[in-house]
Amino acid sequence: MFLLEQAAYLAAHALLKDFASTHVAIAAVLDGTIDGEVWVDRPVEPRVALLANGDAFYLAGLPDEVVDSFANLKELIPDWAYFFVEDRWSDRLGDIWSNRFARPHPRVRMGLPGASYGLAATVLPDGFRLVPIDQRLLDLEPGNIETVTDLMEGWASPELFLENAIGFCVLYDGSVVSHCATDSVSGTRCEVGVGTEPAYRRLGLGKAAAAATITACIKRGRPDIEWHTHASNKGSIAIARSIGLIERDRHLAYSGNLPAENVGDLDLATCREWGLHLERASDHINWYRFHATGAWMLADDRTRALANVRQLVDGGWEGEAEWLEGYWAVQSLVDDPEFKTIVARQRAIREE
């Protein structure tokens, strides 16, 4: 497989064109506005293209014509990838990916139903303030600003983010408590993401930030709005529908992570089943215990969650202690003395 320089990305355009119609991130990487890497099986008239953007990997092409490239693909695609493939590749995953325990993640893509000139503004509760995400916000340095600055990490540069990204956040008591921004943009298209701190949910803050962001996207010539989420993410889908977005299509990703992002997205039986699966996978890939810990906490089994996080650390996990402390699925465990002891041991190991 050949790693392309950005000037040579044109070689992969034809292969990735159909896939990019669903995923703005692909188009944005090819444009050079967000970070990514692109590999092809041959520099001229390639038959397969692999694009990576952060932990997301996208595979397009003709599997029956590139069997000789399967081993190279398996070396390139990490077991921790969040993996999107064209349908024709779905039965060949075992040939090209080392993670044989990954499962499909149902996902939903939503968008505006047609021409629009903006969305009605949402009234915020007293004390909350809606502000654009721009240099003035960064200069203000409100609390929790990392929820905004983290968005820049996937872009080619902070300058490109400030020039091309569109978004709003909600401030309360001097801190960012909700935000919505374009994760990627390409031409008239943009993919929008939203997030609200757990303590401030169900107040309409995400809806207000999303409505303002989409209105600004339209005004700035990017009216083709896309909103991607787990099919299990009831809150995200509800916000999208509340501002007039409709379902465009459904597709799959493949991953070893839980197919959710919030407590309550999955029922207890599903969490228990995932916990058992992730434990089995952990015997082969140790980092699966990270997600097994989350699954058992969501299944209301503290004892089994602690057993998994202990084995994760004892097994030589190379992750950061902060990842455990910030993991959404274990927030009800972070103040547990036993959990704190295990996390402290991981922090000490990483600092050696």
Image (cartoon, rainbow, N blue to C red):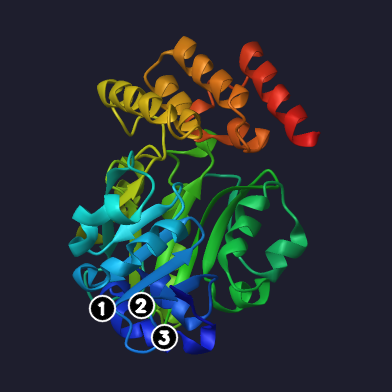
Name which of mark 1 and mark 3 comes first in the sequence: 3
User: Spatial distance from mark 2 to mark 3, Cα to Cα?
Assistant: 35 Å
Residue type indicated by callout 3: Pro
Residue 248 visible at all: no
From the image, which quarter does the N terminus lie in?
Answer: bottom left
Residue type indicated by callout 2: Pro
Residue 350 drawn above or below residue 55: above
Q: Residue at x 33, y 62 (%)?
A: 70
The residue indicated by pointer 3 is 43
The residue indicated by pointer 2 is 223
Q: Assign a secondary structure to mark 2.
A: loop
In-image side of 51 versus 143 (left or right): left
The residue indicated by pointer 1 is 115
Q: Residue at x 51, y 59 (%)?
A: 54
The residue positioned farthest toward the right in the image shown: 352
**Mark 3 residue crowding within 10 angstroms, few (<14) / some (14–19) / many (20+):** some
Name which of mark 2 and mark 3 comes first in the sequence: 3
| Label pair 2/1, CB-CB below 8 angstroms | yes
Residue 207, percent from left and from top: 41, 53
Residue 294, percent from left and from top: 45, 27
